[in-house]
Image (tube, rainbow, N blue to C red):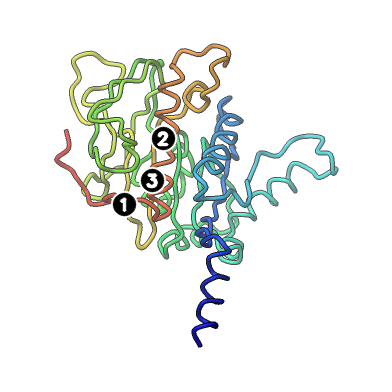
Amino acid sequence: MKKLLVLTLAIISAFPAFAAEKKRVIVCTVTTGFRHSSIPHAEKTLAKLAEESGVYEIVDIAQQPVKGAADGASVEDQMKASMAKLDPANLKAKKIDLVIFANTTGDLPLPDKAGFIKWIEEGGNFAAMHSGSDTLHGFRPFIDMLQGEFAGHGAQVPADLVAGDTKHPANAGIGAKWDIKLEEMYLIKSQDRAKTRALWYLNHHPNKADNAGFFPVSWSRMAGKGRVFYTSLGHREDLWSDDPGLKGRVNSVEIAKQYQAHILGGIKWALGLAEGSAEANPDAK
């Protein structure tokens, strides 16, 4: 018996501890409205963060159809195939933990819109960046799930963000204030503050002087059992990319890395891998 125990321990010690299984993510960058030039950078950065963090893997990506596809598929067939990846049956079959809308726009032709919301509410989890809130305007359950809808924007401006929760993973250790040199700041409507936890916000209108108020930028919430994370940041390529040689860079590499840490923290929270509150904080101001 003693020899058997020694042998068992030797076998165990010969192998490293099993790594935790990576969470499974699908990214969608399809647009039927305005298409941001930062989308290729978003796709690259989300893949980079997956590799560097080691906690999630992008198992599929729903991308924009292209004319003259190598396999001869029509634009319509490509769009159908992309959107089929977000069918609730596929999400369940592939055991997807999180869907990310990275700068999507317009009325995405989801094969089962109601089923997609139900999948989130049953614990599927959802994250979106920038124009993810400029998506599915005509489908109220999506707006209610996200608890925020794009209402317009002005010229790009410096943004002096205020933290609504310095302990949340999406704060990324940035602190109580976050100064971004230049970004397109969204105005948000269709939000009930009693249903969201403000993570970052402006305490003044981004484009109008002496116009104090609460202007949400990033938040977390629960939609049923599903975790929802959103940030309106991500218009500019130099937020997504930390390449020091990026043409036209205005935001520093340090700010880009802060943005990457911000969205990675939000993703990890949405995946249940990092602790953070989703309790509403309507008194943040």
Judging depth in this view, the residue of 96 and 190 nearest the camera is 96
Question: Which of the two labelled residues, at mark 3 and mark 2, occupies the earlier sequence position?
Answer: 3
Q: Position of residue 205 (x, y in %)?
A: 26, 22
Check contact, mark 3 vs mark 2: CB within 8 A. no
Structural distance between the alpha carbons of marks 3 and 1: 13 Å
Q: Residue at the location (31% across, 52% down)?
A: 275
Judging depth in this view, the residue of 180 and 138 nearest the camera is 180
- Could you tell me which secondary element the residue under label 1 belongs to? loop
Q: Residue at the location (56% across, 63% down)?
A: 95
The C terminus: image quadrant = top left
Judging depth in this view, the residue of 169 and 138 nearest the camera is 169
Q: Residue at the location (22% across, 22% down)?
A: 204
Kind of residue sitting beneath label 3? Phe
- Could you tell me which secondary element the residue under label 3 belongs to? strand
Q: Residue at the location (56% across, 59% down)?
A: 112
Question: Which of the two labelled residues, at mark 3 and mark 1, occupies the earlier sequence position?
Answer: 3
Which numbered tag is attached to residue 229?
A: 3
Q: Position of residue 235 (x, y in %)?
A: 47, 26
Q: Does 75 appear above or below 24?
A: above
Structural distance between the alpha carbons of marks 3 and 2: 14 Å
Q: Position of residue 259 (x, y in %)?
A: 42, 30
Residue that numbered label 2 is attached to? 261
Kind of residue sitting beneath label 1? Glu
Q: Residues within 10 Å of mark 2 (few under 14, many from 20)?
A: some
Q: Is residue 189 rendered to the left or right of residue 116?
A: left
Which numbered tag is attached to residue 58?
A: none
Structural distance between the alpha carbons of marks 2 and 1: 15 Å
- Could you tell me which secondary element the residue under label 2 belongs to? helix
Q: Is residue 42 rendered to the left or right of residue 127?
A: right
Dot in front, 3 or 1: 1
Kind of residue sitting beneath label 2? Ala
Residue that numbered label 1 is attached to? 275
